[in-house]
Image (cartoon, grey):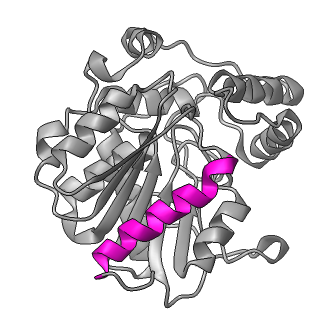
Amino acid sequence: MDVERPRGRPLMPVTMVDDVRIHFEVAGDERGEPLVLIGGGATQLIDWRDEFVDLLVAEGFRVIRFDHRDTGLSQRFGGVGDVDGGYSVAEAAEDVLRILDTIGLPSAHLAGHSMGAIMAQYLALDHAHRVRSIVLLSSIPGLDPVYLSAAEAATAESTPVPAVALAREDAIEQFVGYQRSMHAPAFEFDEEDERRHAARQIDRGYEPNGFLRHGAALVRATDRLERLRSLSIPVAVVHGSEDTLLLPLAAELTAEAVPGAELRIFEGMGHRLERALWPEYVDIIVRTARRATGGTDA
């Protein structure tokens, strides 16, 4: 397997299981509890910032993050102007299993945000023996409109239009604008940091239709609320009180359905994972993992 080690960071392998190429990075001691971070729609592994990963590594985790298919350095599943990659969220979730198989891990803890949390749900339901615990950040248990803002419900019903590749600076501004649209005023929005991060995203692996392909996969998602009642692993459900895309009611119903689930609603938080709350997220991930390991350190 070909690997590279950029700028002193950990090795960055690529899966070749079932001929699906998913680019991922592993950080932390090989003896640590494995934790897979699953980002939201159209995110690259760098959306889990290095500093956040470092906090988790310091807690004893072996942290795995990856580029979703149709993003970053991972495989593309559609051509130019193709808004549907032909896969479901459940099928995309199996990319996590490909990563675990490539590394040689039988199971792992999962922490997913938005679409990534939906993927984590499918993994826990369909491949229970591969999942030790899950933390669901800003998630929904199905596509019932009761979980969605009016704008998000309308988007789910609309016909997607292929995106045009933008010039670099325009693409950066589009990215920053999208992040700003999800920003909740209770937290700082560091525009210059977002612009630098956007530039890194664009330069690393720009795919203008990746978000639409993930949207097509999400539309295929089935309702999972009743199935979630069968989970027997530790689960934490985290949401923002000001999430303008996915409503907090979704988190409340999810936590109510899952036996023993922890529910945490952060006041003032929107759909973004806020830097100011990183220590809180880490504490929840650690606490949930410890429930799976009998209360010992992660």
Residue at x 45%, y 51% (from the top left corner): 112
Q: Is residue 282 magenta?
A: yes
**Residue 295 rendering spot, x and y as whole percentages:** 33, 81
In the picture, the quarter occupied by the C terminus is: bottom left
**Relative side of 16 to 262, left or right:** right
Residue at x 11%, y 40% (from the top left corner): 226
Compared to residue 77, the image places residue 297 above or below, namely below
Compared to residue 130, the image places residue 120 above or below, namely above
Image: magenta residue range: 275-294
Q: Is residue 17 visible?
A: no
Which of the 4 quarters of the picture holds residue 19?
A: bottom left
Q: Is residue 194 visible?
A: yes
Residue sticking out furthest to the front: 267
Compared to residue 71, the image places residue 13 above or below, namely below
Residue at x 48%, y 23% (from the top left corner): 245
Which of the 4 quarters of the picture holds residue 8?
A: bottom right
Q: Is residue 9 magenta?
A: no
Residue at x 45%, y 64% (from the top left corner): 285
Front position in the image: 227 or 130 = 227
**Relative side of 3 to 189, left or right:** left
